[in-house]
Image (cartoon, rainbow, N blue to C red):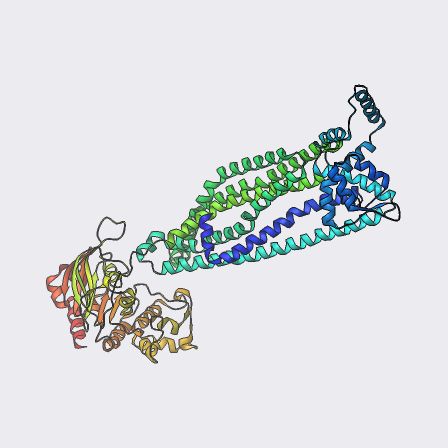
Amino acid sequence: MFKIMKNMKSQWKAVVAIVLLLFVQAICDLALPNYTSKLIDVGIQNSGVEYVTPTVIRAEQTEKVKLFMTEQEAGLWEQCYALGEDGYYHLKDTSAKNLKALDKTFTTPILIAYMIDNLDEEARAAMAQQTQQSAAAGQAPSMADIRAKMEEKMASMGDNLIHSTAVAFTKAEYEATGENLGHIQTSYLWRTGGMMLGMSLLMAASAIMVGLLASRIGAGVGRDLREKVFNNVVGFSNAEINRFSTASLITRSTNDIQQVQMASTMLLRMVFYAPILAVGGIIMVLRTGAGMEWIIGIAVLAILCLVAFLMAVAMPKFKLMQTLVDKVNLVAREILTGLSVIRAFGRENVEEKRFDEANRSLTKTMLFTNRAMTFMMPIMMLIMNAISVLIVWVAAGRIDAGTLEVGTMTAFITYTMQIVMSFLMICMVSIMLPRAAVAAERIDEVINTQPSIHDKEGAKALDTVRGEVAFHHVSFTYPGAEDASLEDIDFTAVPGQTTAIIGSTGSGKSTLVHLIPRFYDVTQGSITLDGRDIRDLPQKQLRSQIGFVPQKGVLFSGTIASNILYGAPDAPEGAMEQAAAIAQAAEFIQDKPEGYDSPIAQGGSNVSGGQKQRLSIARAIARDPKVYIFDDSFSALDFKTDTALRRALGPKVKDSTVIIVAQRISTILYADQILVLDDGRLVGKGTHRELLKTCETYRQIAQSQLSEKELEADYDAKAGE
């Protein structure tokens, strides 16, 4: 829970406001059963007579009540009442505050007077006989003794029953003095009903405000978490991306954050409210004096046992569910990405089966947890109804014995249900919170992961950049791999020259060029830019000087213009058209009705492979960097377009360092320096002619693509260009 709550720190003011509103809501919620009890006990049974102390009383009844008063109580009575012209004693101050204060003093003597007046004949006879026996023995009982015995009997009665019984005396006095009891009752019912309506409206308004604020906080938590995750993931190197996997990062950024967002809202609306309501309900139950508190203990114990059982059964499945969601996302993403390949090889049935297995595993787990949870509500309703029956059964005997009132029983049932529902809310959230806690841990794992590629403390930028790139005995091993992908690579690429890299598939060509922009850091050795180790340079400066064209052309949703200017949004006017012309993309762009404003779908799915590659090359050219890296970027181009592009590119890159990864010999014949890789090692370095003589690996690659005459002719033609 604390992992979820820590995300609310920035919105602590709204949280405090919610807590205050929850107290208001709880006060109203807890007050309503008490008003219901008053409607029954006071409004209906007592005809609306709310206070024991009568506002008007006959003289003979005054004397009778005084018999059971202490001297102090009698003195207060005389101060409060005055004899009227009608012969009745009238209360001087009839305010509710004064009546409530006087009730604390006068309820006991008034109740004793009423109980003695209403003794049946058998009880009166027994009392008279006892008095005669005591008198014969010389021990005549005083009024104080009678009061003490009556107080012992009153001790078994609840406060509400004592009050209600004493009110019967006052009610009889009002009838005897000609007061309109019907008017008193109607006024009380309207007044109490109005109070209940006001409480209900205030409670509803508080609940609405709590819901609104909780939703805003939950949405804010989701927004902040998505921002943190995104900002951190953008800084991840390829090592961190491979560690989490793209599918898992998508799940963590969507489903997991959604779980935390929902839990945050429920936490504020239910978890904070339930303890307030439960504690308040227990206090109100104790105030009723019903003497049935043990029933609440049974109800709470039954709920806790039920929830503990369900948590023990369902919790492991909740934790497994997140992993299964990751797997479904992974399989779905792979299938959607490789849909054309699946169709081409007729693997639809196989992939459907693979997705079905992942989907069924998730479905099976979700069905298990949902079925387990479906047992909760029926059993909870059974427990609550059983508790209600138990309360009515126990209360019926006490009502019959005269120690409990109907209204008090009604209030007790309501408070018990509130307490039970409070514990139920806590338990239900306690089931949901662990799943959200798992999601929060997965999110924190991403947020707290420090990118392995980061700026060195005190990194200083170069004043001027020429673009000389040098590898000094570089070796590299992928994280978690046993064997090195590159070993002892040593070469220098200088401005104004083209360095080509060639080798068989898997020889480490792409790995080598990925080290230059620090997608990975070298394991051994160093890479320098103009003599400075690239690890000592700010990443922003390093990458701002590199125009990188990946092996797989990547385009973003937007327009052709936004994609070309992606790396140089502030490029001078005309730079975009020039870059498109050099990349041989101007022709097909101009053929489109909207030209450079033509839309590009996500991933460039609405353009061909060659067009996508040319736009990727134009994007690198528009940046006008000091170092160009082409990672097998000409593979989708036909020979004519390839030749035209390189011819147009020459003047543009004459002062820059150009590094080309290629599979075709014809693409790199003109290179000033060719590096030959074989199984991660540099087995050849030189020009085309030199390597044909000195490097067997290069000779085999060349002979596998071109004949001897084609090789000589192509080289002479390139040299002439």
Residue at screen point 35% across, 72% down: 564
Q: Residue furthest left?
A: 693
Q: Position of residue 504 (x, y in %)?
A: 22, 58
Q: What is the quadrant of the C terminus in the image?
A: bottom left
Q: What x and y, as percent, mark residue 388? A: 67, 37
Looking at the image, which residue is at 13% across and 64% down?
Answer: 691
Q: Residue 333 appears in which quarter of the rendering? A: bottom left
Quarter of the image for residue 459 reads: bottom left
Q: How many marks?
A: 0
**Does 682 sit left or right of 617 as displayed?**
left
**Camera-nearest residue between 639 and 189:** 189
Relative vertical location of residue 42 with respect to residue 603 in this rendering, above or below: above
Residue at the limit of the structure toward the top, as seen here: 137
Please provide percent x and percent y for residue 311.
50, 39
Q: Position of residue 143 (x, y in %)?
A: 77, 30
Position of 524 with respect to 637 (left or right) is left
**Residue 177 against residue 194 in the figure, above or below:** above
For residue 68, above or below residue 84: above
Furthest-bottom residue in this view: 573
Q: Nearer the viewer, residue 239 or 640?
A: 239
Task: Please tell me which residue lies in front, 597 or 668.
Answer: 597
Residue 414 visible in rendering: yes
Q: Is residue 325 visible?
A: no
The image quarter in which residue 246 lies: bottom left
Q: Nearer the viewer, residue 168 or 477?
A: 168
